[in-house]
Image (cartoon, rainbow, N blue to C red):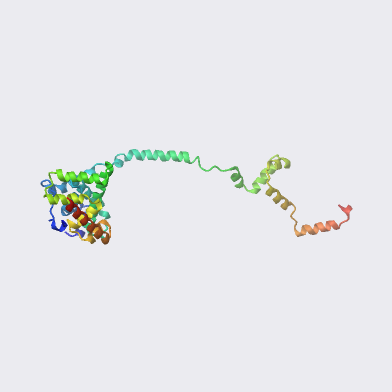
Amino acid sequence: MKKLEDIPKKQIFTVPDRYFEELPSKIQDRITAKHQTPGFFERFKVSYTIALAALAILVILIWIPGQKKVTAEEMLASISTEELIAYLNDIDISDDELFDAIEFNTTDVEDLEDEVFRFEDSDIIILEELNDLPKDTL
Amino acid sequence: MEDKDLIAKLRNPDTKNYGFNLLIRTYQQRVYWHVRKMVIDHDDADDLTQEIFIKVFRHIDNFREDAQLYTWIYRIATNECLSFLQRKKRRFFLPIGDVAEELTQKLESASDISGDEVQLKLQKALLKLPDKQRIVFNMKYFDDLSYEEISKITDTSVGALKASYHHAVKKIEEYLEAN
């Protein structure tokens, strides 16, 4: 079997005359040429900067108005209770009209009932005293 | 000139061009022959060699000096060769065999290749190897690099390189015997 170690190592490839003398300057010339020729982005820097600025302005003009809208509830929540009461007292609206306008849910009703029928200790004493009074007194 | 002096010249804007000229003259032959053995054709090797040195020029500031300069340059050269051969296969949708066949034909027809029959047969045997195995073989057999040096260039373990080389030798010898 032919062994690799039996084959002498030889360079079979050749190069043109003076190739290695001229190669350094060929490479240097290519590097200089790359530096001098502006790249794609360099050439169009001003144009695309203006385009980007215009796009940014457009985005801001469309985006800002499209920002989160404030809901009626959020607006009301920002007004103090005293201001609301003062307003309601000022406007010409009856209690019946007011209650018609309010949409109570079950929780609201229960909360209101608790508020109306909450007794403090002093109230209980007064009630008991009232019960002791003769019927025809009230 | 020592590596550190050359690198210092390359990193100084005032001496960069001079330093780069020195670098090319120091390493051009090693780089060129490393590439030529892989791509066979002189024009391809010439293009690639220039690209390699342009990359070295552009990235010299990224060179971390944790290896020798020539190891770093060799690594760039190795990667460029392998990328070139990969692109060649993809461009023409050629399987490995067809690119090897094309390179073999260049071996036989090129006027700038002069070798006796045995030498040409050896080169044809090398073209049967996968590209990575071939480049490792070239660095070991023709360039006399140590396994440790090749390991740094290819980022492959010494053990894997030894196995790859010995397997390559076996395949080459089988080819020479059969042809």
Where in the figure is residue B11, as x and y percent of width and height?
23, 55
> Percent x, y for residue A90?
69, 42
Task: Name the quadrant of the N terminus of chain A.
Answer: bottom left
Residue B3 in percent (x, y) is at: 20, 59
> What residue appears at the point 64 percent right and 46 percent down from the top-left corner?
A83
Instruction: Depth check: give the residue in front, B142 or B2.
Output: B142
Residue A46, given in percent of the width and then of the height, sits at 33, 39
Q: Is residue B118 visible?
A: yes
Q: Is residue B116 left or right of residue B134?
A: left
User: Which one is nearer the viewer's eye here, B1 or B153?
Assistant: B153
Q: How many marks?
A: 0
Residue at left 65%, top 48%?
A81
Location of residue B68 with respect to A57 vertically, above or below:
below
Tell me if I can see residue A32 in this picture. Answer: no
- Of B32 and B4, nearer the camera is B32
Depth order, front residue of B122/A112: B122
At a point 81% along the width and 56% down the height, the residue shown is A127
